[in-house]
Image (cartoon, rainbow, N blue to C red):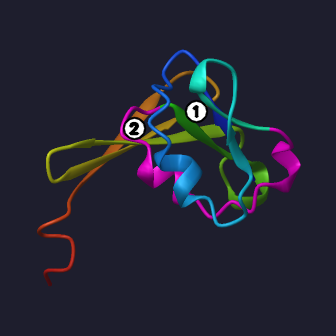
């Protein structure tokens, strides 16, 4: 499991850098985030949840049933939108309203 930072979507806000518990994400050229050694990623998804621009993809490998799909998260107000794109490009989305997430 690992992340991929899409430079064309990164705004350089630094939220992912602050969120990474392993201190693996750094500020690179142009102030944008990058990770030097993808293999060191713990797969905790902290950075993914902090990125408000959908610039970080989490690779869902076969070891967790993802078969090469990627996961991104973006926020619209109080709603987190989790988007899963499979290898064929099909998209599924899960919308979670943070204000209602813990209601039973």
- Toward the viewer: 63 or 13? 13
| Left or right: where 10 falls relative to 76 | right
Mark 2 closeness class: few <14, some 14–19, many ≥20 residues within 10 Å? few
The residue positioned 71% from the left and 38% from the top of the image is: 68
Residue 100 percent across, percent down from the top left = 12, 69
Mark 1 closeness class: few <14, some 14–19, many ≥20 residues within 10 Å? some
Distance (Cα) linking label 1 and label 2: 9 Å
User: Circle 2 is placed at which residue position?
Assistant: 92
| Left or right: where 7 falls relative to 40 | left
Region rendered in magenta:
36-54
Q: Secondary structure at mark 1?
A: loop
| Left or right: where 37 falls relative to 66 | right
Residue lying at the far bottom in this picture: please name it.
104
User: Circle 1 is placed at which residue position?
Assistant: 86
Q: Which mark is residue 52?
A: none
Residue 4 percent across, percent down from the top left = 67, 35
- Toward the viewer: 15 or 68? 15
Answer with the quarter of the image where residue 59 lies: top right
Verify CB contact (< 8 Å) between mark 1 and mark 2: yes
Look at the picture and state if 76 lies above or below 102. Answer: above
Answer with the quarter of the image where residue 73 lies: top left
Residue 35 percent across, percent down from the top left = 75, 40
């Amino acid at each position: 499991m690992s992340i991929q930072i899409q430079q064309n979507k990164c705004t350089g806000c630094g939220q992912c850098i602050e969120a990474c518990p392993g201190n693996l994400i750094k500020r690179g050229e142009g102030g944008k985030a990058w990770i030097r050694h993808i293999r060191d990623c713990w797969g905790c998804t902290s950075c993914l949840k902090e990125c408000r621009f959908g610039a970080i993809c989490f690779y869902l490998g076969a070891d967790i049933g993802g078969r090469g799909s990627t996961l991104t998260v973006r926020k619209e107000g109080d709603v987190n939108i989790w988007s899963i794109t499979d290898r064929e490009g099909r998209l599924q989305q899960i919308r979670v309203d943070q204000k209602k997430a813990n209601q039973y």
